[in-house]
Image: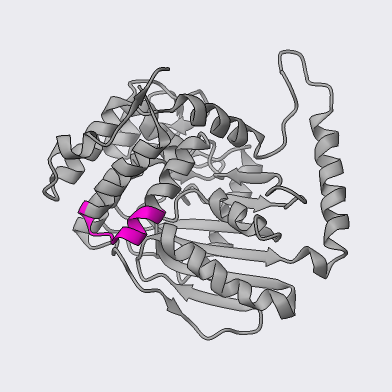
Amino acid sequence: MNYSAPSLERFAHCALSAYGCDAGEAKIVSEHLVAANLAGHDSHGIGMLPMYGAQIRDGNLIPNQKPEFLPRNGAITVVDAKMGFGHRITPLALDHAMETIGEQKVAILALRNAGHICRIGTYSEYCSRRGYVSIHMVNVVGHDPIVAPFGAREGGYSTNPVSMAMPLKDSPGPVLDMATSTVAFGKVRVAHNKGQTVPPGCIVDKEGVGTTDPGPMVRAKEGALTAFGEHKGSGLGVMAELMAGALAGTNTIDKARTFPNGVHNNMLSIILDPSGFDDADAIAERAQRYCNFINGLQPAKGIDSVLMPGDPENESRRRRGEHGVPIDAETLRQTADSVAKYGIAPDQLMNHLEKLPV
């Protein structure tokens, strides 16, 4: 079933308010989640709500938390989110870090101890809309590692996403937003909720053998996600762990504390002002010319067109903005069950949804 984006925001806002978020935080988080759905990243959309509800009950996610801004060291800013909602605190931390750009032409942010920051591409877009180039690396702690490094049968890190963006003159420009696993765990969860298998090469079972059945991993945490690109993606995931965990954070996943329903993030962000390199318009023109070059290449047989990073998300936004966002019944049921634990009747939540024809 497809639902309108505004109604999904009301649905998410209702759930987050029940969890204890104030109106401002509920608005920011709900908009972030639905924006992820619109971009086609359902693994980071409203399906995250039941996990947030469970984390708050366990005391591992704190609504309306006030972050700690540590003393700045040159262009380096460290912000401790203190287990607050990453969706709200991350833009605050980026804004604080970007105060150095006027003088330094660069800002480096170490965000640590954040609740789930969700879709990392959101923050690349956030910087790019301000005219800045940015690179972001995240590690994921709070639970056992779920991605098997190349050659392993068990997890050595988590999905450890990497994102970067290059602004153009009139748009955020190309945005790379990727997990260093072949797929995010949320995609495995979504497949399980829909009663579907996952594509070959995405997960391994407890013996390290490839499987397409998401059930054991979702239900019992058996097996692991695979690294994308074999040893190359595995190496990038390991480096993201070091950059975000050992450098920007306070622990890598092998030493970080685990807890029920645990997902905390550390992030290293490098934000660059193009005018520190050359005339910003000249850089944007060169970048636009190259984007046009890639888009204009002859597509391979069976492919409609050659895309830049971010093009699939833009197409998804157009399509889902017009026809609505598909949400499976199991995700809605899980959210209703979660919110019921906070005293909100399922009908009170579900009445916010507006169905659209597919």
Report the side of 173 relative to 142 (left or right).
right
Q: Is residue 155 above or below residue 292?
A: below
Residue 118: x and y, percent?
Answer: 45, 50
Residue at 25% across, 47% down: 15
Magenta span dominant secondary structure:
helix
Query: Foreground: 6 or 231?
Result: 6
Residue 143: x and y, percent?
Answer: 35, 54
- In the image, which residues are magenta? 18-28
Please identify the residue farthest to the top as the structure is shown: 302
Query: Foreground: 203 or 189?
Result: 189
Residue 147: x and y, percent?
Answer: 47, 44
Confirm whether the magenta stretch covers residue 279: no
Quadrant in which residue 326 is drawn: top left
Residue at 54% across, 36% down: 182
Q: Is residue 312 above or below residue 255?
A: above
Quadrant in which residue 306 is drawn: top right
Quadrant in which residue 295 is drawn: top right
